[in-house]
Amino acid sequence: MPFFEREITMIRIGHGYDCHRLIDGDRLILGGVEIPFHKKFQAHSDGDVVLHAVIDALLGAAGLGDIGKYFPDNDPRYENASSMGLLSATYQMLKKKKLKVINLDITIIAETPKLAAHKLAMQVNIAHALQMDIQFVNVKAKTNEGMDAIGEGEGIAVHAVVLLCIPIATEFS
């Protein structure tokens, strides 16, 4: 009779959200991609709302709290910080706990700029930082149809949902 070993895993789901006001500037950073635009985020770090929402989703799924716990906006070490660096640090926290990212779904809500041409680059950046296949990172861009502050172009918001797994046992048969 053949001998089989299989890993039993637990899955965990996390949701992240972030938004920032737009102010006069010359570029936005979304998903680690510099996007030419006449506005930028009003933020302590680079303001990358995509990566901030992803970080919150990852930390939530891992049961580790939120982005403010590790990268507080009143800490001078994170002033103008690259959110790609914060994502990499978050990934290292997950790795220490043996958590693996299975998939990630991101929804960007913005009237402008148009993001279709930048979504693939965002997916590549995020997949690379999380050491996962790009096919498991999905980025969508939606508008708010002109409603509320986001719809009037005053800010951008992002929702991110992540699925993690952690091995909990090995079964032999």
Image (cartoon, grey):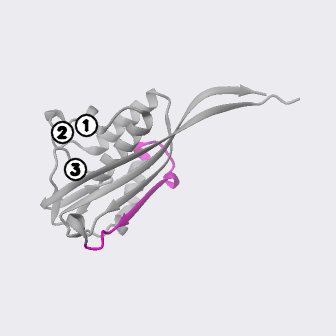
Residue behind mark 1:
68
First along the sequence among labels 1 and 3: 3
Q: Residue at x 40, y 40 (%)?
A: 58
Foreground of the two, 84 or 60 = 60
Q: CA–CA distance between discs 2 and 3?
A: 10 Å
Looking at the picture, does residue 131 appear above or below residue 28?
above
Question: Mark 2: which secondary structure?
Answer: loop
The percent position of residue 73, horizontal first and vertical second, equals: 18, 39
Marker disc for residue 14: none
Q: Quarter-wise, where is residue 165 in the image?
A: top right
Residue behind mark 3:
47
Q: Is residue 101 highlighted in magenta?
A: no
The kind of residue tagged 1 is Gly
**Left or right of 45 in this view: 16:** right
Q: Residue at x 70, y 32 (%)?
A: 6
Confirm or deny contact between disc 2 and disc 1 (CB under 8 A): yes
Taking the view exactly as shown, the residue that stands out farthest to the right is: 1
The percent position of residue 140, horizontal first and vertical second, equals: 40, 62
First along the sequence among labels 2 and 3: 3
Q: CA–CA distance between discs 1 and 3?
A: 13 Å
Q: Which residues are magenta?
A: 128-146
Question: Mark 3: which secondary structure?
Answer: loop
Residue behind mark 2:
73
The kind of residue tagged 3 is Gly
Looking at the picture, does residue 134 appear above or below residue 170?
below
The kind of residue tagged 2 is Asp
| Label 1 Cα neighbours within 10 Å, binned few <14 / some 14-19 / many ≥20 | few
